[in-house]
Image (tube, coloured by chain):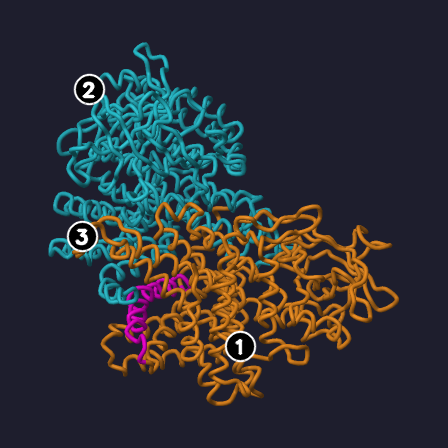
Chain colours: A cyan, B orange
Amino acid sequence: MYKAPVEDIAFTLNHVAGLKQALGEGKLGDLSDDLVDAILLEAGRFASDAVAPLGDIGDKQGARLVDGKVEVPPGWDKLYRDWAAGGWNSLTASPDFGGQGLPHMLNVAALEMWNAGSMAFALGPTLTMGAVDALTAHGSDALKQIYLPKMVSGEWMGTMNLTEPHAGSDLGVMKSRAERRDDGTYRIFGQKIYITWGEHEVTDNIIHLVLARLPDAPAGTRGISLFLVPKYLVNEDGSLGARNDLYCHSLEHKIGIHGSPTCTMIYGDGKFGSEPGAIGYLVGEENRGLACMFTMMNNARLAVGMQGVAIAEAATQKAIQYAKDRTQGKAPGWTGSGMSPIIEHPDVARMLVTMKALTQGSRAICYSCAHATDMSHHAEGDEARHWAERAALLTPIAKSFATDAGVDVSSLGIQVHGGMGFIEETGAARLWRDSRIAPIYEGTNGIQAADLVTRKLPLSDGKHVRGFIGELKQIAEQVRGSNLEGFGETADRLAASLADLEQATDWLLERLAAGDSASALSGATPYQRLFGLALTGAYLAKAALAEEEHGRDKRLSLCRFTAENLLAETVALKDRVISGAESLKAARALFA
Amino acid sequence: MYKAPVEDIAFTLNHVAGLKQALGEGKLGDLSDDLVDAILLEAGRFASDAVAPLGDIGDKQGARLVDGKVEVPPGWDKLYRDWAAGGWNSLTASPDFGGQGLPHMLNVAALEMWNAGSMAFALGPTLTMGAVDALTAHGSDALKQIYLPKMVSGEWMGTMNLTEPHAGSDLGVMKSRAERRDDGTYRIFGQKIYITWGEHEVTDNIIHLVLARLPDAPAGTRGISLFLVPKYLVNEDGSLGARNDLYCHSLEHKIGIHGSPTCTMIYGDGKFGSEPGAIGYLVGEENRGLACMFTMMNNARLAVGMQGVAIAEAATQKAIQYAKDRTQGKAPGWTGSGMSPIIEHPDVARMLVTMKALTQGSRAICYSCAHATDMSHHAEGDEARHWAERAALLTPIAKSFATDAGVDVSSLGIQVHGGMGFIEETGAARLWRDSRIAPIYEGTNGIQAADLVTRKLPLSDGKHVRGFIGELKQIAEQVRGSNLEGFGETADRLAASLADLEQATDWLLERLAAGDSASALSGATPYQRLFGLALTGAYLAKAALAEEEHGRDKRLSLCRFTAENLLAETVALKDRVISGAESLKAARALFA
């Protein structure tokens, strides 16, 4: 059973992402070390003791559509209420609406723990938080007053309605439409698919944020507006009124996250109400809906990255336990009686250490991304811009590298379990199945790579990414200067990987400057992985350098393994970026 | 829907694996080109038209245990009978018992097609063929006369019973026991798990081959005997007699291959018959059961490798079709109206070409392995030994590289499908779920790697593997000498990868000679992948070099992409083999 790694989480937040320094410099208001520790400890307790035990039943039973109502798995109603009562929905929300105004770093760490307990469960709150963010940034005061307090407390949950059958990655072609009414409200019509937690009875009301197109809207993404569409209309006194004209038509049959109802939603076909059309309220300005989405996209993408970290952590814990308990054969050098625990076999050890390295690297990248977001909110002027660019740069890497790690690490977890991994009994299988959606939704990892290369590298004319690589090189120099024997060849290996990153970055910026985006995009995915691996090496080195007595040997050895085994891949990735485009172009003949 | 790629298969058999040359030199008896073509064409037709359409229902419905009887999915009874009536069960079996005595190469190609149609379905026949092989090699004449004709025709199916809860990779600790009876037969007692197609009503009888231990047997693997244990005893006239004392206790709930009943089998607990104990007949000699298994292990491992090739091929076909049909966004350079087919996006194209390369590389490796087996059977003396060593060397690479490719390629297939990939509708999800068992069973891929390094590299004192690498280098030189522009940098890239392979091989042989098996085993998995990638590069080059007008441009471009993108990884893998062991050893502190 998953046990939240609170110490690892706190250490990474404090010493890798920079929470300790930010606290020391007073950049996070009056937040104290002690409060941080207390929050992490309590989140860890709730995730381990309350969420994780209900993960398997959530998978086995799944969400079900029965007589038009969505039933969540047994125990999840109460679990959600207890979770919301603990204040976990409101960590980062504005105090103006009952939120706690805490840094994103803390919420991201908590999200990791909820997701490790049950990704399907954590998805509901994740979407609610996204809706709260969007409404806080763009809603009118009236809308905020009515909806935000109950969404922040968790009394009502929220959803995001973007995708349509022919509009997934490309929202510009969506067909859902909105009609203006005389009273300033709108009627919404259309079908939305893949709507996470789109319908259920867990909360009395569900607040849908829906993208739709006005009759006179320009074509493409500049003609999309955002609407708040509640399941039940809300009376002036805050009580619930009539059922709005929307419903869940069906649930998807998915590989994983079975406990999360993934709904096809129908708006405005006349099932409820006196005339067809779901009542909606404009959020932000007409035709600016996509801009509203973009303001929350970084947070949402990072939240998905946390799912990758969470799955990887849970899978690693499970595999280590199994490998210590299971005995088979005799490992080289084994002197015990009978069979060795399989953890003694070098190949199994290689899998487990790789799992640990990818998990901790992903965690460090994601937390560093949250740190940048927090810093951008607590700074002004150039400093704010610096951190906003850092968050923008790290977001696609965090999302993609961590979600790929989720799939890869949980697959290694299955392999460690042998035959037991392929049957559903141990739970290793569930983690792998759940993990597979994360590289797809909230922008596929290929789209993250395109975003990284074409939008993020050019920030400040490429100066931002170059400055960042410069910072990372300093870590390699600190390793070199530390003279700690446990680092092995880390300094050289890390420096070489950072040089690979630098060369690939220069090449991409040069291609973009030349207007050759096709070549740049051809190498986008290998580049994104190269960046993630180099960051993993740098951040694990930073962790090992931190002046902490407790557990230093372990951090050193994980850093060294990463440098001397995993970082070897960066030279191959750089080569694919720089030399791979021509042959890819030629190979398109295969599909002619 | 899967369409068997008969042309690709025939081309790879003939021009890469060496079938055409073997036919030309008369090394395969009186088998003709025409017969080969006819067999492949007919197998392709049956796989595409009969097997593939029943793959999805097999997954959705699955095998079920109802009132003690195992029900296979709807339509599978008839499918199996039609398949057996087509003679497909007997391709390689001995003509003495009704078999066709054809080369393994043909059976391996046919297995690819059955598995691509439905891996869960193909598993049953695969196990029967394994039982036929074992019985043919080690059974007494009496046993062969009674059982083989009906197992070769497919009238009866067969199973292999090895695994027990505490004896998976390490069979030496198995507990199932056999007691001698006065009439020369045995009574068998014990529990076996993960028994593929262990129980069903598709055939009138099921012939179980069961490993068990005699009371006076030595400890460990030298004390295991092999028994034939039929579900129904067979009377002297060949008619079926009493039900034997064995039954299926339960079916496993698995990630995939749902149509294949994976049984826990109970032998000898008194449920059937007048006294407890299933009647068994010794196969081979007492205490030599594991040796009997080893004679068929190469074929069984290669058969699992074919599952990887099959899944990869099916996933690639599905993804290409989807990527041509689905439109989203505008790819760079897209001049058509509206959105581009996603195949136009460089990142999607990269995924698809990678899928094709891994599929065709895996296929070439597996067919070459089957070719070596065939050559060893049709030669004598040194030549037979040469080819037996080649088959022994290629088997772990074929099994592991192809099954890893099955997982990786089907995962890319899901990614190409985006959100549609995560729901079960398209069938992309099923391929990924089915694929995951293949790197585990029939010896995990980690065990394949250990076998490759510690048993196969030392064959003929390392001369065999060195000679093989020498042959591969000649392919690189032929590329260099061809002056075909379409090869791009293939000659240099392939030569570099083969040099990586050579250095890693030398290092491993040196470590083994020094008695340092721990270091050698630490690098076994990266080495195995390095070998598979280098072979992929060499074999795709061999295909592109073949003097064939039709489709040469496509083969050249796939070869070039492989060389200029995928082979970049070999230098990293070599580095892990040679420099990775120390840090892995140090990192064990993480689990102390």
Say which chain tag 2 marks. Answer: A
Relative placement, left or right, of A449 versus B391 is left
Per the image, the residue denoted by label 2 is A182
Q: Is residue A367 left or right of residue A474?
A: right
Give me the residue at 61% from left, 53% from top. Answer: B72
| Residue type of the residue flagged with mark 1 | Leu
Label 3 sits on residue:
B337
- How packed mark 3 is, by other alpha carbons closer than 10 Å (few <14, some 14-19, many 20 or more), is few
- Residue A289 location, x and y as percent? 21, 32
In this view, the residue in front, B350 or A186, is A186
Q: How far apart are marks 1 and 2 (CA)?
A: 86 Å
Counting from the top left corner in percent of width and height, residue B317 is at 38, 61
* Residue type highlighted by circle 3: Ser
Q: Name which quarter of the figure residue A287 lies in.
A: top left
Q: Distance between the residues labelled 3 and 2?
A: 37 Å
Side (left or right) of B461 relative to A579? right
Q: Give the range drawn in magenta.
A: B549-578
The Cα–Cα distance between marks 3 and 1, rounded to whole angstroms, is 61 Å
Which residue is the extreme one toward the top? A237
Furthest residue in direction right, as rendered: B182
The reply to whether the magenta stretch includes residue B573 is: yes
The residue shown at (41%, 46%) is B422
Disc 1 marks which residue?
A: B459
Marks 3 and 1 belong to one chain: yes
Instruction: Tally the numbered discs.
Output: 3
